[in-house]
Image (tube, rainbow, N blue to C red):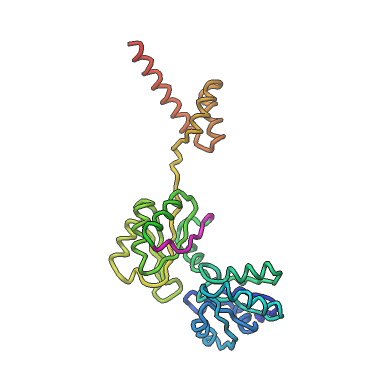
Amino acid sequence: MNNNEDISASTLYIVPTPIGNLGDITERALSVLRGVDVVAAEDTRHTGLLLQHFAISARLFALHDHNEQQKADHLLAKLQQGQSIALVSDAGTPLINDPGYHLVRRCREAGVRVVPLPGPCAAITALSAAGIASDRFCYEGFLPAKTKARQDRLLQLSEETRTLIFYESTHRLIDSLTDMATVLGESRYVVLARELTKTWESIQGAPVGELLAWVKEDENRRKGEMVLIVDGFQPDESALSAEALRTLELLRAELPLKKAAALAAEIHGVKKNALYRYALAQNEADDDAEDDNQD
């Protein structure tokens, strides 16, 4: 197998780096880091240690949240002049809650080639081990730092049926779990994945009320890099909307009850039996009301 990447001129490479275990870096990532003209890094000191570990000598350029919009055009000019650049973050896949969006956007607008490499990502790593539905999910990054804003965000997401993925910091973990229990309900299932791929890796799942108590039991359980995987909202399939009931009433006037319930269920995507039981209950209520009037 040839692991040497043919580095192209005027190309921006998006290079994931390990989130903990250095053995997770790919041969292709190492080849790109060895071959490019410049490595644009979120923290040049952090990336310098990584490159030193793999005996890679590279020219480093600082690109972080505070200077990205100002420096993006400078790097774009280098690319347009024929240089190749690797974009890395402190850990994981760049742009996933890390700098890089403005640079990539400017490159694409200018017609500069952008080549993404697959690799480590804490959100996806946590999701794969959470035991929560992974066919539909949404990544929400960090929740707001202040209580009111955090609760408002959770309220907006409270009926989201997709699995939710959050990053969280050590000093806000308890507050976020507390607000989840308050807004989403203590029974909502949440998985806390901590220090993934590292020595003290921990993955713990429970209804959020129980998970909060578990975290409070030991200070070590809220240390390190953390991902929260939250089970999506499970709607009550027996609940019937006003629209479905209105449709049922209109159809009942023209069709037998079973047929009316079946058609209304198909139109609104609800269970036929639930509509049928509702209609029967309404019939009984109407009959009782008629008897009362006769008395």
Q: Determine whether 276 is above or below 175 in the image.
A: above
Which residue extends farthest front?
70
Q: Quadrant of residue 227?
A: bottom left
Bounds of the magenta span? 135-145
Residue 188: where, in percent of width, then height?
39, 53
Q: Quadrant of the C terminus?
A: top left
**Would residue 288 be found to the left or right of residue 128 on screen?**
left
How far from the left and from the top, in percent, is residue 10? 70, 77
Quadrant in which residue 74 is drawn: bottom right
Identify the residue shown where x is 51% and y is 65%.
Answer: 124
Q: Position of residue 230 (x, y in %)?
A: 43, 57
Q: Position of residue 36 (x, y in %)?
A: 64, 82
Asked if 135 appears above or below 28 in the picture, the reply is: above
Query: Total number of numbered labels?
Result: 0
Quadrant of the image for the N terminus? bottom right
For image coordinates 47% across by 76% down, the residue present is: 20
Q: Is residue 288 magenta?
A: no
Q: Residue furthest top?
A: 294
Q: Is residue 215 left or right of residue 240?
A: left
Residue at (34, 53) in percent of width and height: 182
Q: Is residue 136 magenta?
A: yes
